[in-house]
Image: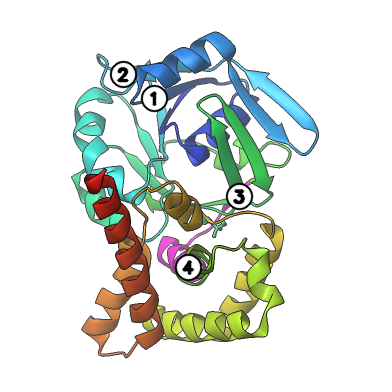
Amino acid sequence: MKIGVIGGGSIGLLFTAYLSKSPHEVVLFVRREAQQQAIGTMGLTLKYGSSVYTCQPGVRLLSGADHNDIDVLIVAVKSYNIEQVMPEIGEKFSRTRSILFVQNGMQHLRVLPKLQMHSIYIGVVEHGALKESDHLISHTGLGQTKIAPYLDGHSGINWEKLSKENFPFTYQNDWYAMLSEKLHINAVINPLTAILKVTNGALLTNPYWVYLMKQLSKEACKVLNIKDHEAWKDLVTVCKNTSLNKSSMLRDIENNRKTEIDAINGFLLNSAQQKNIEVPNNRFVFQVIKGMEESMESRGNNG
Ligand code: PAF
Protein backbone atom coordinates (compact mmCIF):
# COMPACT_ATOMS: atom_id res chain seq x y z
CA MET A 1 0.00 0.00 0.00
CA LYS A 2 1.28 3.49 -0.84
CA ILE A 3 0.39 6.18 1.69
CA GLY A 4 0.50 9.86 0.73
CA VAL A 5 0.69 12.67 3.27
CA ILE A 6 -0.08 16.21 2.14
CA GLY A 7 1.55 18.93 4.24
CA GLY A 8 5.14 19.59 5.28
CA GLY A 9 4.15 21.22 8.59
CA SER A 10 4.45 19.70 12.05
CA ILE A 11 1.55 17.22 11.79
CA GLY A 12 2.39 16.16 8.22
CA LEU A 13 6.02 15.49 9.19
CA LEU A 14 4.99 13.62 12.35
CA PHE A 15 2.66 11.31 10.38
CA THR A 16 5.25 10.78 7.64
CA ALA A 17 7.99 9.86 10.09
CA TYR A 18 5.91 7.40 12.14
CA LEU A 19 4.23 5.82 9.11
CA SER A 20 7.67 5.33 7.54
CA LYS A 21 8.25 2.79 10.31
CA SER A 22 5.50 0.63 8.77
CA PRO A 23 6.09 -1.77 5.86
CA HIS A 24 4.15 0.60 3.59
CA GLU A 25 5.71 3.10 1.22
CA VAL A 26 5.14 6.68 2.34
CA VAL A 27 5.21 9.75 0.09
CA LEU A 28 5.15 13.26 1.52
CA PHE A 29 3.68 16.05 -0.63
CA VAL A 30 5.05 19.53 -0.02
CA ARG A 31 4.71 22.94 -1.64
CA ARG A 32 8.31 24.18 -1.52
CA GLU A 33 11.24 22.83 -3.48
CA ALA A 34 13.57 23.78 -0.61
CA GLN A 35 11.76 21.37 1.71
CA GLN A 36 11.68 18.65 -0.95
CA GLN A 37 15.44 19.01 -1.37
CA ALA A 38 16.15 19.13 2.38
CA ILE A 39 14.30 15.85 3.03
CA GLY A 40 15.59 14.32 -0.20
CA THR A 41 19.22 14.89 0.79
CA MET A 42 19.15 14.66 4.60
CA GLY A 43 16.14 12.42 5.22
CA LEU A 44 13.40 13.21 7.72
CA THR A 45 14.44 13.04 11.37
CA LEU A 46 12.03 12.39 14.21
CA LYS A 47 13.06 13.21 17.78
CA TYR A 48 11.21 11.88 20.77
CA GLY A 49 12.89 12.43 24.14
CA SER A 50 16.40 11.11 23.70
CA SER A 51 15.54 8.86 20.76
CA VAL A 52 16.32 9.95 17.22
CA TYR A 53 15.07 8.20 14.08
CA THR A 54 15.83 9.19 10.50
CA CYS A 55 13.83 7.89 7.56
CA GLN A 56 13.86 8.50 3.83
CA PRO A 57 10.28 8.88 2.65
CA GLY A 58 9.48 9.78 -0.95
CA VAL A 59 9.01 13.56 -1.26
CA ARG A 60 7.14 15.17 -4.12
CA LEU A 61 5.86 18.59 -4.96
CA LEU A 62 2.08 18.63 -4.71
CA SER A 63 2.06 20.74 -7.85
CA GLY A 64 3.86 17.95 -9.77
CA ALA A 65 2.32 15.62 -12.32
CA ASP A 66 -0.30 12.99 -11.50
CA HIS A 67 -0.11 11.20 -8.17
CA ASN A 68 -2.43 8.38 -9.12
CA ASP A 69 -0.21 5.71 -7.55
CA ILE A 70 -1.33 6.72 -4.04
CA ASP A 71 -3.77 4.31 -2.33
CA VAL A 72 -4.44 6.21 0.87
CA LEU A 73 -4.12 9.95 1.34
CA ILE A 74 -3.74 11.84 4.62
CA VAL A 75 -4.46 15.56 4.38
CA ALA A 76 -2.46 17.32 7.10
CA VAL A 77 -2.55 20.97 6.01
CA LYS A 78 -4.02 23.71 8.23
CA SER A 79 -7.78 24.13 8.04
CA TYR A 80 -7.46 27.45 6.22
CA ASN A 81 -5.37 25.82 3.47
CA ILE A 82 -7.87 23.09 2.69
CA GLU A 83 -9.63 25.02 -0.07
CA GLN A 84 -6.24 25.64 -1.68
CA VAL A 85 -5.32 21.93 -1.93
CA MET A 86 -8.79 20.70 -2.96
CA PRO A 87 -8.34 21.21 -6.74
CA GLU A 88 -5.08 19.21 -6.64
CA ILE A 89 -6.71 16.46 -4.59
CA GLY A 90 -9.55 16.31 -7.10
CA GLU A 91 -7.32 16.28 -10.20
CA LYS A 92 -4.17 14.39 -9.24
CA PHE A 93 -5.25 11.57 -6.94
CA SER A 94 -7.79 10.00 -9.25
CA ARG A 95 -7.01 6.42 -8.15
CA THR A 96 -6.86 7.09 -4.40
CA ARG A 97 -9.67 5.22 -2.68
CA SER A 98 -9.35 6.44 0.89
CA ILE A 99 -8.71 9.84 2.37
CA LEU A 100 -8.20 11.02 5.96
CA PHE A 101 -8.52 14.63 7.15
CA VAL A 102 -6.81 15.66 10.40
CA GLN A 103 -7.61 19.38 10.71
CA ASN A 104 -8.55 21.23 13.87
CA GLY A 105 -12.05 22.68 14.03
CA MET A 106 -14.96 21.81 11.77
CA GLN A 107 -14.63 24.10 8.79
CA HIS A 108 -13.10 21.43 6.58
CA LEU A 109 -16.34 19.43 6.71
CA ARG A 110 -17.82 21.60 3.99
CA VAL A 111 -15.38 20.29 1.34
CA LEU A 112 -16.11 16.61 1.98
CA PRO A 113 -19.18 16.30 -0.28
CA LYS A 114 -17.00 17.38 -3.24
CA LEU A 115 -14.74 14.31 -2.93
CA GLN A 116 -14.82 11.29 -5.25
CA MET A 117 -13.08 8.84 -2.88
CA HIS A 118 -14.81 5.65 -1.77
CA SER A 119 -13.93 6.09 1.86
CA ILE A 120 -13.55 9.35 3.76
CA TYR A 121 -12.23 9.40 7.30
CA ILE A 122 -11.97 12.17 9.85
CA GLY A 123 -9.20 12.20 12.42
CA VAL A 124 -8.30 14.20 15.46
CA VAL A 125 -4.68 14.46 16.50
CA GLU A 126 -3.90 14.74 20.17
CA HIS A 127 -0.11 14.72 19.81
CA GLY A 128 2.14 17.66 20.43
CA ALA A 129 4.66 18.23 17.64
CA LEU A 130 7.23 20.90 16.87
CA LYS A 131 8.70 21.38 13.41
CA GLU A 132 12.28 22.37 14.15
CA SER A 133 13.28 22.64 10.50
CA ASP A 134 12.09 21.45 7.09
CA HIS A 135 13.47 17.98 7.83
CA LEU A 136 13.39 17.74 11.64
CA ILE A 137 10.29 17.06 13.70
CA SER A 138 10.11 16.78 17.49
CA HIS A 139 7.35 14.73 19.07
CA THR A 140 6.73 16.91 22.12
CA GLY A 141 3.51 15.48 23.53
CA LEU A 142 2.41 11.88 23.45
CA GLY A 143 -1.22 11.42 22.46
CA GLN A 144 -3.22 9.46 19.92
CA THR A 145 -4.96 9.92 16.58
CA LYS A 146 -8.65 9.13 16.78
CA ILE A 147 -10.25 8.11 13.50
CA ALA A 148 -13.91 7.87 12.57
CA PRO A 149 -15.47 7.02 9.22
CA TYR A 150 -17.38 9.85 7.57
CA LEU A 151 -18.14 7.82 4.45
CA ASP A 152 -17.18 4.19 4.79
CA GLY A 153 -16.89 2.57 1.39
CA HIS A 154 -15.21 -0.44 3.00
CA SER A 155 -11.82 0.40 1.59
CA GLY A 156 -10.30 -2.27 3.78
CA ILE A 157 -7.96 0.03 5.65
CA ASN A 158 -7.30 -0.97 9.18
CA TRP A 159 -6.01 2.25 10.71
CA GLU A 160 -5.37 0.65 14.08
CA LYS A 161 -2.92 -1.72 12.37
CA LEU A 162 -0.86 1.30 11.33
CA SER A 163 -0.29 2.15 15.01
CA LYS A 164 3.33 2.38 16.09
CA GLU A 165 4.82 2.62 19.54
CA ASN A 166 4.08 6.17 20.80
CA PHE A 167 1.86 6.79 17.77
CA PRO A 168 -1.43 4.92 18.17
CA PHE A 169 -4.54 5.13 16.01
CA THR A 170 -7.86 4.38 17.68
CA TYR A 171 -11.27 3.95 16.09
CA GLN A 172 -14.34 5.96 17.00
CA ASN A 173 -17.85 5.34 15.68
CA ASP A 174 -19.27 8.81 15.69
CA TRP A 175 -17.26 11.41 13.77
CA TYR A 176 -19.48 14.28 14.91
CA ALA A 177 -19.09 13.46 18.61
CA MET A 178 -15.36 12.99 18.13
CA LEU A 179 -14.89 16.32 16.33
CA SER A 180 -17.08 18.15 18.84
CA GLU A 181 -14.96 16.90 21.72
CA LYS A 182 -11.77 18.00 19.99
CA LEU A 183 -13.27 21.33 18.99
CA HIS A 184 -14.12 21.95 22.64
CA ILE A 185 -10.50 21.24 23.62
CA ASN A 186 -9.08 23.52 20.92
CA ALA A 187 -11.59 26.29 21.66
CA VAL A 188 -10.23 26.51 25.20
CA ILE A 189 -6.52 25.68 24.99
CA ASN A 190 -5.59 27.33 21.70
CA PRO A 191 -6.79 30.93 22.13
CA LEU A 192 -5.87 31.13 25.83
CA THR A 193 -2.33 29.85 25.34
CA ALA A 194 -1.89 32.14 22.32
CA ILE A 195 -3.10 35.21 24.20
CA LEU A 196 -1.28 34.45 27.46
CA LYS A 197 1.80 33.09 25.62
CA VAL A 198 2.07 30.04 27.85
CA THR A 199 2.41 26.29 27.32
CA ASN A 200 -0.67 24.06 27.53
CA GLY A 201 0.14 22.77 31.00
CA ALA A 202 0.73 26.25 32.44
CA LEU A 203 -2.97 27.04 32.04
CA LEU A 204 -3.74 24.64 34.88
CA THR A 205 -1.25 26.23 37.26
CA ASN A 206 -3.06 29.54 37.66
CA PRO A 207 -6.56 29.74 39.23
CA TYR A 208 -7.51 32.82 37.21
CA TRP A 209 -6.67 31.06 33.97
CA VAL A 210 -8.51 27.92 35.12
CA TYR A 211 -11.54 30.17 35.67
CA LEU A 212 -11.26 31.43 32.08
CA MET A 213 -10.88 27.87 30.82
CA LYS A 214 -14.07 26.89 32.63
CA GLN A 215 -16.04 29.79 31.15
CA LEU A 216 -14.91 29.01 27.61
CA SER A 217 -15.49 25.32 28.18
CA LYS A 218 -19.06 25.75 29.48
CA GLU A 219 -20.04 27.89 26.51
CA ALA A 220 -18.51 25.47 24.01
CA CYS A 221 -20.25 22.49 25.63
CA LYS A 222 -23.61 24.24 25.43
CA VAL A 223 -23.20 25.04 21.73
CA LEU A 224 -21.86 21.60 20.84
CA ASN A 225 -24.36 19.83 23.07
CA ILE A 226 -21.78 17.81 24.97
CA LYS A 227 -21.64 16.92 28.66
CA ASP A 228 -19.51 19.54 30.38
CA HIS A 229 -18.27 17.39 33.25
CA GLU A 230 -16.72 14.74 30.96
CA ALA A 231 -15.51 17.31 28.46
CA TRP A 232 -13.70 19.15 31.27
CA LYS A 233 -11.94 15.95 32.34
CA ASP A 234 -10.76 15.32 28.76
CA LEU A 235 -9.56 18.90 28.48
CA VAL A 236 -7.48 18.61 31.64
CA THR A 237 -6.01 15.31 30.41
CA VAL A 238 -4.91 16.89 27.10
CA CYS A 239 -3.40 19.86 28.98
CA LYS A 240 -1.43 17.46 31.16
CA ASN A 241 -0.37 15.13 28.31
CA THR A 242 0.89 18.06 26.26
CA SER A 243 1.89 20.12 29.25
CA LEU A 244 5.23 21.41 27.92
CA ASN A 245 3.84 21.84 24.45
CA LYS A 246 2.97 25.14 22.85
CA SER A 247 -0.42 24.98 21.16
CA SER A 248 -0.58 25.30 17.39
CA MET A 249 -2.23 28.70 17.79
CA LEU A 250 0.52 30.03 20.04
CA ARG A 251 3.07 28.80 17.50
CA ASP A 252 1.19 30.47 14.67
CA ILE A 253 1.13 33.77 16.55
CA GLU A 254 4.81 33.51 17.47
CA ASN A 255 5.68 32.84 13.84
CA ASN A 256 3.46 35.63 12.49
CA ARG A 257 1.21 33.15 10.73
CA LYS A 258 -2.52 33.11 10.28
CA THR A 259 -4.24 31.04 12.99
CA GLU A 260 -7.10 28.52 12.92
CA ILE A 261 -9.33 30.78 15.01
CA ASP A 262 -12.03 30.91 12.28
CA ALA A 263 -12.29 27.11 12.15
CA ILE A 264 -12.36 26.81 15.96
CA ASN A 265 -13.93 29.67 17.97
CA GLY A 266 -15.28 31.27 14.77
CA PHE A 267 -17.16 28.06 13.98
CA LEU A 268 -18.55 28.04 17.54
CA LEU A 269 -19.70 31.66 17.26
CA ASN A 270 -21.64 30.86 14.08
CA SER A 271 -23.28 27.79 15.60
CA ALA A 272 -24.09 29.75 18.78
CA GLN A 273 -25.78 32.44 16.73
CA GLN A 274 -27.88 29.88 14.87
CA LYS A 275 -28.93 28.31 18.17
CA ASN A 276 -29.44 31.65 19.97
CA ILE A 277 -26.84 30.88 22.62
CA GLU A 278 -24.78 33.64 24.24
CA VAL A 279 -21.01 32.97 24.12
CA PRO A 280 -19.37 36.18 25.38
CA ASN A 281 -16.09 34.55 26.41
CA ASN A 282 -15.63 32.83 23.05
CA ARG A 283 -16.49 36.10 21.31
CA PHE A 284 -13.86 37.87 23.42
CA VAL A 285 -11.02 35.45 22.61
CA PHE A 286 -12.06 35.39 18.95
CA GLN A 287 -11.79 39.19 18.75
CA VAL A 288 -8.44 39.22 20.56
CA ILE A 289 -6.88 36.63 18.23
CA LYS A 290 -8.34 38.26 15.10
CA GLY A 291 -6.90 41.55 16.34
CA MET A 292 -3.48 39.92 16.84
CA GLU A 293 -3.60 38.54 13.29
CA GLU A 294 -4.59 41.94 11.96
CA SER A 295 -1.78 43.75 13.74
CA MET A 296 0.72 41.15 12.48
CA GLU A 297 -0.51 41.73 8.95
CA SER A 298 -0.25 45.50 9.18
CA ARG A 299 3.23 45.25 10.72
CA GLY A 300 4.20 42.96 7.83
CA ASN A 301 2.74 45.34 5.28
CA ASN A 302 4.57 48.29 6.79
CA GLY A 303 7.86 46.73 6.52
O1 PAF B 1 -3.83 22.58 18.25
C1 PAF B 1 -3.11 22.04 19.12
O2 PAF B 1 -2.10 22.59 19.58
C2 PAF B 1 -3.47 20.64 19.57
O3 PAF B 1 -4.65 20.26 18.93
C3 PAF B 1 -3.62 20.45 21.08
C4 PAF B 1 -4.24 19.11 21.36
C5 PAF B 1 -4.41 21.56 21.73
C6 PAF B 1 -2.27 20.30 21.74
O4 PAF B 1 -1.46 21.42 21.68
Q: Identify which residue is drawn at 35% across, 62% down.
A: 292
Q: Are marks 4 and 2 in contact (CB under 8 Å)?
A: no
Looking at the rendering, the stretch of residues picked out in magenta corresponds to 169-185
Q: Mark 4 vs mark 2: which is more N-terminal?
A: 2
Q: Nearer the viewer, mark 3 or mark 4?
A: 4
Label 3 vs label 2: CA separation? 28 Å
Q: Where is residue 193? Give x, y as percent.
A: 53, 65
Q: Which residue is mark 4?
A: 195
Q: Amino acid at mark 2?
A: His
Q: Nearer the viewer, mark 1 or mark 4?
A: 4
Q: Residues within 10 Å of mark 2 (few under 14, many from 20)?
A: many
Q: Amino acid at mark 1?
A: Phe
Q: Amino acid at mark 4?
A: Ile
State the mark number for residue 67: 2
Looking at this view, name the residue that lies furthest to the front: 303
Residue 98 can be seen in this image? yes
Prevailing secondary structure class for the magenta stretch in the rendered image: helix
Residue 227 can be seen in this image? no
Q: Which residue is mark 3?
A: 127
State the mark number for residue 29: 1
Q: Where is residue 177? Give x, y as percent.
A: 45, 68
